[in-house]
Image (spheres, helix red, strand yellow):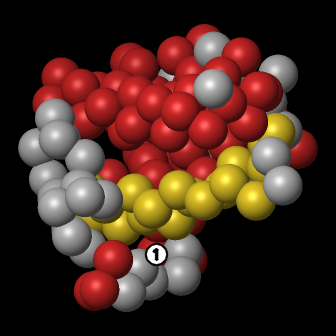
Amino acid sequence: MANADFEDLVETFEFLDDWEDRYRHVIDMGKAMDPLEEALRVPATKVDGCASQVWLVPQINDGVFTFRGASDAMIVQGLIAVLSALYNGQPVADVLKTDAPAELARLGLNDHLSAQRSNGLRAMVERIRETADASNS
């Protein structure tokens, strides 16, 4: 159910030999993201349940979901980029159908994130799904 950007990421991960290389790639993805303006880093966009500071700014235009985000932690910024590859450009209905844990498991993330990071990742997915669900009603 994943989009082409996420499938490209899965392929990239298959070529990376070990988790440290994958970890670096996730961090590099985060560094490559456009910065989120300070004006958008407000309580309404902050994601609770993350050990670090995380802000997600979703947008739905013509039934297509996108979001921008930022974190004060490099690996979390990279996880935002991973979620962006998974969700951005998807029709809202597909966002709700996406099995994020299964898709992220294809990258091996579940095995290499701390419990706090995993909880934060779940909180980000939950926020994305809530936004998509609210717009789909």
Taking the image as shown, residue 97 lies to the left or right of residue 101, namely right
Q: Residue at x 44, y 48 (%)?
A: 79
Residue visible at 33% across and 77% down in the picture:
40
The quadrant of the image that shows the C terminus is: top right
Q: Is residue 124 left or right of residue 54?
A: right
Q: Which amino acid type corresponds to the residue marked 1 in the rendered image? A: Lys
SS at mark 1? helix
Give residue 126's quadrant in the image. Answer: top left
Where's residue 94, x and y in %? 78, 27
Asked if residue 66 lies left or right of residue 55, the reply is right
Considering only vertical position in the picture, is 134 above or below 103?
Answer: below
Count of labels shown?
Answer: 1
Residue 73: give x, y in percent of width and height.
Answer: 22, 62
Asked if residue 101 is positioned above or below residue 30 in the image, the reply reads above
Q: Which residue is mark 1?
A: 31
Does residue 31 lie above or below 136 as drawn? below
Quarter of the view holding residue 86: top right
Using the rendered image of the protein, determine whether residue 69 is visible from the camera's viewpoint.
Answer: yes
**Quarter the N terminus occupies:** top right
Q: x%, y% of residue 119?
A: 24, 26
